[in-house]
Amino acid sequence: MSQPATIFAISDLAREFGITPRTIRFWEDQGILAPEREGSKRIFTRRDRARLKMALRGKRLGLSLAEIKDLIGMYNSTEDETPQLVKCLSVMSKRREALEQQREDIEAVLAEIGQFEALCREELLRRRNVQDQNS
């Protein structure tokens, strides 16, 4: 069985994660990734790959760039992952609360739209009935 690659080109990561090299360069510009350089060529390590994976997951979960950077940055600070896990749970809890509030807001707006649609249908029906009576 072959050993997984320990270094990656930007095209390798782009293909693996289904993103563009531009997206990877964005995460590099934000300080999430720090590839080594061979001339103008970027050389990414497994650490960079893991950080990119975490950043993309954070983005999918709707975390802010600051939250993503904070969480990823914590993994450099210590061998004990307990603080990272506690912080992650806190961030996820806040995100869950925000999403639940959004869901409540969406449900309220949908109910209001439903009421307005019903009023519009009633008015159209009333106008048709008036029109039929005048014909």
Image (tube, rainbow, N blue to C red):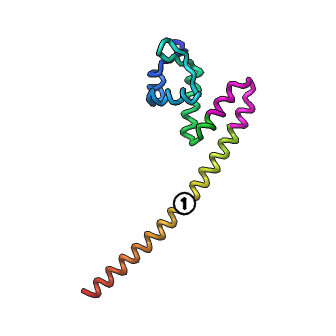
98, above or below 108, in the image: above
Q: Residue at x 74, y 33 (%)?
A: 83
Q: Residue at x 67, y 45 (%)?
A: 93
Q: Residue 10's x, y, as percent?
A: 47, 21
134 displayed left or right of 31: left
* Residue on which the image places disc 1: 107
105, above or below 97, in the image: below
Q: Residue 100's x, y, as percent?
A: 61, 53
Q: Nearer the viewer, residue 58 or 70?
A: 70
Amino acid type for the residue under numbered disc 1 = Glu
Q: Residue 126's x, y, as percent?
A: 37, 81
37 displayed left or right of 126: right
- Secondary structure mostly seen in the magenta stretch: helix
Q: Residue at x 59, y 37 (%)?
A: 65
Based on the picture, tell me whether residue 70 belongs to the magenta stretch: yes
Q: Residue 63's x, y, as percent?
A: 59, 41
Q: Residue at x 27, y 87 (%)?
A: 134
- Magenta-highlighted residues: 69-87
27, above or below 131, in the image: above
